[in-house]
């Protein structure tokens, strides 16, 4: 970060994928590595923010000074996030599953159970980010991410408004050098009254730049 400190603030960050169990051996997951969210947590903790990182299943070390809680599913992430409130800032960088199996099987589903195919019934997960933004203990600043394969600005602005966010950082996924798994990224940061492009740059650098915008917003008169 370049100067503006989040020292003394409580920052709650989510990172990584969620895994939604189908049965004891199979799950629905996604390609999130956790790098973006972990970089944000590291950049928040370094200048002194009390940082809680709620992490889906990833293979990353906990950044120094960060309090980490590991979860597996969207439902677990929601419970941990809500228990971690209040916070001054919430940043939802996790790739949370939108759907989860309606009835996870308690025993391995056998091939013969499906004949030539198998239909899985999925139900919507709770939207953690929208829940935080509507919470009685709403953080002063709620920042979402948007993972898009096209129409980046329109889709991101729709999420910004619909989920009642202060900021949204949109990134392209499914392209090389950006989004899931990559070390680098480009963030298009939208607010109701502005737009900024950060990068392309390493996620570690973008995390600091995003937190600079957060710190700037926190200084605005309410
Ligand atoms: O982890 P990396 O490999 O470094 O990749 C980084 C990233 C691509 C995962 C990250 O930069 C990113 O885009 N994270 C958000 C991914 C996502 O789920 O986007 P979305 O457009 O589907 O969701 C919009 C927002 O709603 C996100 O802030 C998400 O955390 C939140 N959400 C979504 C569904 C849900 N049930 N609850 C949520 O809170």
Image (cartoon, rainbow, N blue to C red):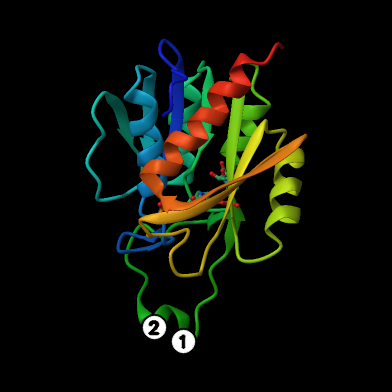
Q: Residue at x 40, y 56 (%)?
A: 184
On-image quarter of the N terminus: top left
Residue 29 lies in what quarter of the image?
bottom left
Residue that badge 1 annotates: 115
Compared across the picture, whether 128 is left or right of 49 comes to: right
Is residue 76 something that shows in the picture?
Answer: no
Residue 41 point in image, percent of width and height:
37, 32
Of 127 and 91, the residue lying toward us: 91
Q: Residue at x 45, y 27 (%)?
A: 12
Of 214 and 18, the residue lying toward us: 214
**Numbered-mark total:** 2
Q: Residue at x 35, y 17 (%)?
A: 48
Q: Residue at x 45, y 43 (%)?
A: 206
Q: Is residue 43 above or below residue 201?
A: above
Q: Is residue 111 above or below residue 171?
A: below
Q: Residues within 10 Å of mark 2 (few under 14, many from 20)?
A: few
Residue 123 point in image, percent of width and height:
60, 55
Residue that badge 2 annotates: 112
Q: Is residue 42 above or below residue 198?
A: above
Q: Do the residues bearing badges 2 and 1 touch, measured as CB atoms within 8 Å? A: yes
């Amino acid at each position: 970060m370049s100067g503006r400190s989040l020292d003394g603030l409580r920052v709650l960050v989510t990172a990584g994928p969620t895994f939604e169990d189908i049965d004891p051996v199979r799950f629905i997951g996604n390609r999130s590595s956790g790098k973006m969210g972990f970089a944000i947590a590291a950049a928040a903790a370094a200048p002194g923010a009390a940082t809680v990182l709620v992490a889906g299943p990833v293979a990353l070390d906990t950044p120094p000074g960060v309090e980490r809680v590991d979860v597996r599913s969207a439902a677990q992430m929601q419970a941990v996030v809500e228990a971690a409130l209040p916070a001054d800032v919430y940043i939802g960088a996790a790739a949370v599953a939108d759907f989860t199996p309606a009835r996870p099987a308690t025993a391995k589903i056998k091939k013969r159970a499906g004949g030539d195919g198998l239909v899985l019934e999925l139900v919507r997960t709770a939207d953690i980010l929208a829940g935080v933004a509507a919470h009685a203990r709403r953080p002063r600043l709620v920042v979402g991410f948007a993972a898009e394969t096209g129409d980046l600005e329109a889709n991101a602005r729709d999420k910004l408004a619909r989920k009642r966010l202060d900021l949204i950082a949109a990134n392209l996924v499914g392209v090389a050098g950006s989004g899931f798994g990559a070390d680098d990224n480009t963030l298009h940061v939208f607010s109701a009254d502005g737009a900024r492009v950060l990068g392309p740059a390493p996620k570690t650098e973008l995390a600091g730049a995003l937190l600079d915008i957060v710190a700037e917003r926190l200084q605005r008169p309410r």
